[in-house]
Image (cartoon, grey):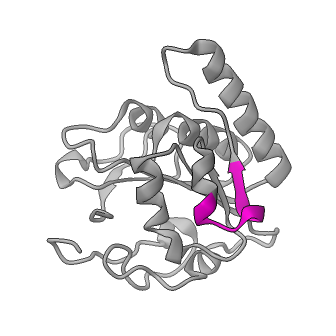
Amino acid sequence: MLATPAPAWNTRSWGGSNAGGLYGHIPPTGRLEMLCNSSRRKQVLGIASGGGHWTQLRRLAPAFPDGTIWVSTNSGCAEEVPERCFRRIPDADLWRKFALMWMAFRVFMLVLVKRPTHVVTTGAAPGWFMVVFVRILRGKTLWIDSIANAESLSVSGAKARRWATVVWTQRPKVAGPALPRKAAIKFHGGVL
């Protein structure tokens, strides 16, 4: 439950109308389908590393359409979603360069196979790679920075700001205006 009132779900940048709230009043299943106005097949993908990032992403699950592909670095996360909708990618961080390149390659291959039109991520390296590759293929992306980042965007979030269609923060102090070649950071409440 939020301490502040739930703001309106801003769907204009996603191609839909302004309807319903996101946090505290999660949109009904299928709402993201309404947001996809392109004529090509719609494929929504939610991606996060394990742990807190995954927990935050899964709290948004009621807003995702059936058939959403869920991606995580933790194979234990597969228990929370239908088996046919889960994909595991390898974990990596900035200090393991080879593992990071392998993860980027696996994310790229997943993008080529699944061709997601919309991606939602709660951050970390897997989400950043997905945002970059999907934007190159002209997909729409939503980066929701982790609630753990109270003072500024995460390292991945700061990098994703250049690539993501929309960037949200869960802390009002972190919100900021658009900059040249960088998306605005908007506050829309928190998921915890």
Q: What is the magenta range? A: 79-87
Q: Nearer the viewer, residue 81 or 167?
A: 81
137 on left or right of 149: right
Residue 46 in view? no
Query: Where is residue 126 drawn, in percent x and y?
Result: 58, 38
For residue 44, above or below residue 19 = above
116 on left or right of 4: right
Residue at the location (73% across, 63% down)? 83
10 on left or right of 137: left
Residue 83 lies in magenta, yes or no?
Answer: yes
Residue at the location (82% across, 68% down)? 40
148 on left or right of 76: left
Residue at the location (46% across, 44% down)? 123
Query: Where is residue 48 drawn, in percent x and y?
Result: 53, 48
Q: Quadrant of the N terminus?
A: bottom left
Q: Nearer the viewer, residue 128 or 184?
A: 128
Query: Where is residue 68 drawn, in percent x and y?
Result: 68, 67
- Residue 32 placement: quadrant: bottom right
Residue 102 lies in magenta, yes or no?
Answer: no
Residue 60 in view? yes
Q: Quadrant of the C terminus?
A: bottom left
Residue at the location (67% across, 29% down)? 104
